[in-house]
Image (spheres, helix red, strand yellow):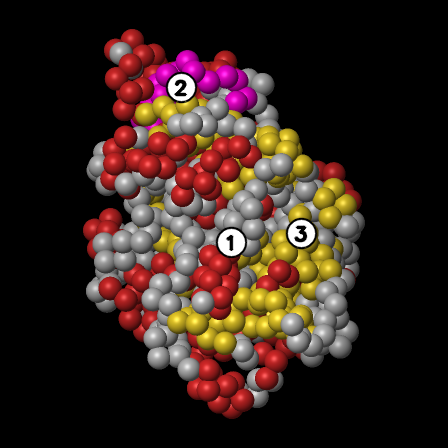
């Protein structure tokens, strides 16, 4: 049948431009090999049978084997019966004879576009047979008429198909595990291998604009991707056209590679401004308008900003005239309304033409910009000290979007409601760039604090995806109608700990499970996230593909350690206020490129559990006390209030705990009684309780611990 294989190779290459990569990994895998591939179309079996060099065996369900007689002629078929355990044993014996066997661990063709659940059988087969696992990604066939994704993607007759063979892997469970635990270990390990494969074979070594162009080619230039309260939808084409037009206007008063401030809410104008600056080789610095004049001026000084872009309409609506008045003394303010008035018909025609050949235009305007160059400057929240400038590269942001997409099946059928500010990394990467690069439509809402309005916006926009902090999600749940979130598939929480009360309310009132994730600005930001396939309550999910980690032992902390991470999403470095616009690359005791998150965590079965911030431990009587754990006790007692614990100087024990709470009838005696009933030691009970009407919060919804400490010290002094 050699002639048949050669003929089919020629035909498939002609029609689908099939490309086979990574043959060196195939040769390095040895003789006893289990080839695991993702399953995206009816073409998959034929593609592997035709393009893999040897006559490999295929482990196929007996019913499917009868349907594909052509494949049966090209390969050795090992019929599998999922209800017969002898099939697994037979496959193990087959591999032990030093054969190569192909299997699709998902057991079915994907209907989501992403990896579906991975069955435990292939992992057990690999362990028992001692076979090397060879991951193989099939990419492109999901866009063909042979896939099951006609309602999700823009299907074509003959899309380009790429087969990528990744480096070989092995699975070896610890000897002490029981048979059932070994089975679970093998399934989890194989799923990680598959998601790592999806990430590693994706293109993320590119600039943001190039990635958007690639997404437009995949999903269609006329797909609507951005909308805001003005209800003027932007397609990929119109988004780039507006960006090119505005970019030309902004280039008149800015220089190449200049850091330029962006002082705008979450709206279409914000993302257009960001892309406009990037198109002309400028670097947008996202300014937090919720921190007041002093905070904004500090950020401008840290990033050495000379020019700031904003909008008169926004300044008036948000009541920020005083902030702009002070800011004008330090930088030049430029209003989008003024820039729009300067744009003539010739500029619009030029932009129209440029949007039809964006690749060539970008090559002309910013050919010297590389994926590893700065793309955006964000600023840390300042919840525990002076904000720092965080410089993220194009590669950082694109890689993080790809990492998330490798674990969760986002796609063109989804509609994202993003009310998070774009000066926050969660709102920028998760709420804006991830949808753009995945073909999703994003509805941008200017403020996450409109608790009564946002649920209704979700209802009318038919949102399927939402991102939020615990504070914001709890606020929406309080005012929302039970049917407002009827269309939601995913609600992802981050930036602060998700409270059990918030999780339970969303589940019982809306029937929606909140998936908690974790990240920091310095990691673009997502490090881990729970998913429908792998979710553990109380954890923040498994670390994303491509991320290495180390746990540094912390004196006085019994379990876990201080988390250090490394990966393609780790920032280029910091800008510090005392050394403006001078990049300080990340480095820890583990070497260059590593970032110290400052969080104390434990990792079990790959799931990360946050124990607390390193800075949020107090040393009392020689023992370390987690302030987050003390807050958790207060939340258990008074779940409907907000609580924050800080430590202040104490002459007798060095430090003492102080609780700031919005529980108006809070009494320490009640807290003491409750804590003792929970078996909590006296050292973990706050010495004083201070009641406030409102908790100091940052614009991102996180507790402002600097503000909390100042308020407590002021009250204590009084």
The residue depicted at 68 percent of the width and 60 percent of the height is: 562
Residue 479: x and y, percent?
A: 24, 64
Instruction: Classify 10 Å Cα crowding around label 2: few (below 14), some (14-19), many (20 and above).
Output: many
What residue appears at the point 66 percent right and 75 percent down from the top-left corner?
653
Q: Foreground: 180 or 400?
A: 400
Magenta part of the protein: which range? Answer: 235-258
- The earlier-in-sequence mark between 1 and 2 is 2
Q: Quadrant of residue 541?
A: bottom right
Residues at marks 2 and 3, CA–CA distance in whole angstroms: 37 Å
178 over 337 or under it: above or below: below
* Residue sticking out furthest to the top: 346
Question: What residue do we see at 67% from left, 37% from top?
Answer: 584
Q: Is residue 392 left or right of residue 551?
A: left
At label 1, counting other C-alpha atoms closer than 10 Å, the crowd grade (few under 14, some 14-19, many 20 or more) is: some
Give the label, 3 or 1, closer to the camera: 1
Q: How far apart are labels 3 and 1 at the CA level? A: 17 Å
On-image quarter of the N terminus: top right
In the picture shown, does residue 405 fall above or below 372? below
In this image, 280 relative to 580: left or right?
A: left
Task: From the viewer's perspective, tell me whether residue 530 is left or right of residue 192.
Answer: left
The tag earlier along the polypeptide, 3 or 1, is 1
| Residues tagged 1 and 2 counted as in contact (Cβ below 8 A) | no
Which element is circle 3 on?
A: strand
Helix, strand or loop at disc 1? loop
Between marks 1 and 2 in the image, the one whose residue lies nearer the viewer: 1
In this figure, which residue is indicated by the disc labeled 1?
A: 383
Q: Mark 3: give few (<14), some (14-19) or many (20+) Cα within 10 Å.
A: many
Label 3: which residue?
A: 596
Give the spatial CA distance, label 1 vs label 2.
Answer: 33 Å
Q: Which residue is mark 2?
A: 250
Membership of 243 in magenta stretch: yes
């Amino acid at each position: 049948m050699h002639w048949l294989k050669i003929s089919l190779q020629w035909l498939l290459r002609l029609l689908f431009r099939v490309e086979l990569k990574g043959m060196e990994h195939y040769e390095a895998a040895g003789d006893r090999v289990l080839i695991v591939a993702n399953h995206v179309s009816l073409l998959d079996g034929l593609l592997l049978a035709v393009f893999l060099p040897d006559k490999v065996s295929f482990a196929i369900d007996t019913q499917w084997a009868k349907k594909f007689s052509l494949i049966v002629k090209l390969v050795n078929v090992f019929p599998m019966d999922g209800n017969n355990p002898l099939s697994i044993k037979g496959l193990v014996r087959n591999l032990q004879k030093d054969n190569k066997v192909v299997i699709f661990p998902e057991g079915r063709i994907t209907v989501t576009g992403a990896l579906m659940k991975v069955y435990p059988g292939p992992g057990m087969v690999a362990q028992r047979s001692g076979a090397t696992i060879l991951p193989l990604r099939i990419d492109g066939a999901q866009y063909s008429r042979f896939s099951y994704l006609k309602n999700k993607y823009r299907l074509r007759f003959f899309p380009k198909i790429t087969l990528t063979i990744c480096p070989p892997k092995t699975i070896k469970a610890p000897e002490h595990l029981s048979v059932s635990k070994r089975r679970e270990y093998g399934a989890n390990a194989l799923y990680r291998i598959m998601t790592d494969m999806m990430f590693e074979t994706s293109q993320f070594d590119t600039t943001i604009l190039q990635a958007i162009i690639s997404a437009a080619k995949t999903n269609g230039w006329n797909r609507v991707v951005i909308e805001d309260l003005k209800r003027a939808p932007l397609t990929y084409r119109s988004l780039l056209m507006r960006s090119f037009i505005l970019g030309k206007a902004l280039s008149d008063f800015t220089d190449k590679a200049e850091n330029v401030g962006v002082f705008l809410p979450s709206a279409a104008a914000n993302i257009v401004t960001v892309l406009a600056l990037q198109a002309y080789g400028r670097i947008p610095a996202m300014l937090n308008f919720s921190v007041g004049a002093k905070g904004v001026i500090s950020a401008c000084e840290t990033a050495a900003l000379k020019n700031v872009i904003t909008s008169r309409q926004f300044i008036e609506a948000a009541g920020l005239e005083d902030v702009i008045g002070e800011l004008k003394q330090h930088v030049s303010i430029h209003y989008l309304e003024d820039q729009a008035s300067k744009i003539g018909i010739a500029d619009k025609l030029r932009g129209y033409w440029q949007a039809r050949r964006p690749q060539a235009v970008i090559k002309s305007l910013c050919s010297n910009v590389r994926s590893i160059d700065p793309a955006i400057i964000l600023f840390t929240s300042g919840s525990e000290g002076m904000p720092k400038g965080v410089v993220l590269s194009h590669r950082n942001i694109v890689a993080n979007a790809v990492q998330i997409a490798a674990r969760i099946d986002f796609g063109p059928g989804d509609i994202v409601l993003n009310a998070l500010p774009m000066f926050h990394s969660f709102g920028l990467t998760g709420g804006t760039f991830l949808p753009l690069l995945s073909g999703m439509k994003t509805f941008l809402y200017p403020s996450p604090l409109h608790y009564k309005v946002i649920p209704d916006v979700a209802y009318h926009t038919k949102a399927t995806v939402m991102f939020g902090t615990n504070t914001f999600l709890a606020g929406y749940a309080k005012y929302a109608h039970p049917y407002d979130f009827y269309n939601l598939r995913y609600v992802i929480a981050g930036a602060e700990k998700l409270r059990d009360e918030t999780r339970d309310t969303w589940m019982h009132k809306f029937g929606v499970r909140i998936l908690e994730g974790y990240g920091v600005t310095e990691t673009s930001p997502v490090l881990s996230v729970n998913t429908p396939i792998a979710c553990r309550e109380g954890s923040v999910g498994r670390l994303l593909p491509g991320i290495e980690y180390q746990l540094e032992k912390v004196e006085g902390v019994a379990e876990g350690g201080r988390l250090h991470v490394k990966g393609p999403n780790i920032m280029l470095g910091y800008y510090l206020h005392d050394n403006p616009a001078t990049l300080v690359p990340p480095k820890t005791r583990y070497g260059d490129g590593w970032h110290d998150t400052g969080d104390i965590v434990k990792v079990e079965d790959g799931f990360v559990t946050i124990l607390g911030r390193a800075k949020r431990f107090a040393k009392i009587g020689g023992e370390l006390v987690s302030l987050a754990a003390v807050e958790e006790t207060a939340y258990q007692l008074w779940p409907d209030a907000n609580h924050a614990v800080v430590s202040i100087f104490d002459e007798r024990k060095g430090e003492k705990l102080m609780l700031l709470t919005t529980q108006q009838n809070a009494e320490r005696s009640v807290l003491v009684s409750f804590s003792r009933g929970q078996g909590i030691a006296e050292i973990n009970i706050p010495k004083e309780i201070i009641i406030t009407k409102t908790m100091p919060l940052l614009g991102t919804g996180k507790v402002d611990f600097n503000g909390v400490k100042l308020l407590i010290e002021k009250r204590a002094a009084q």
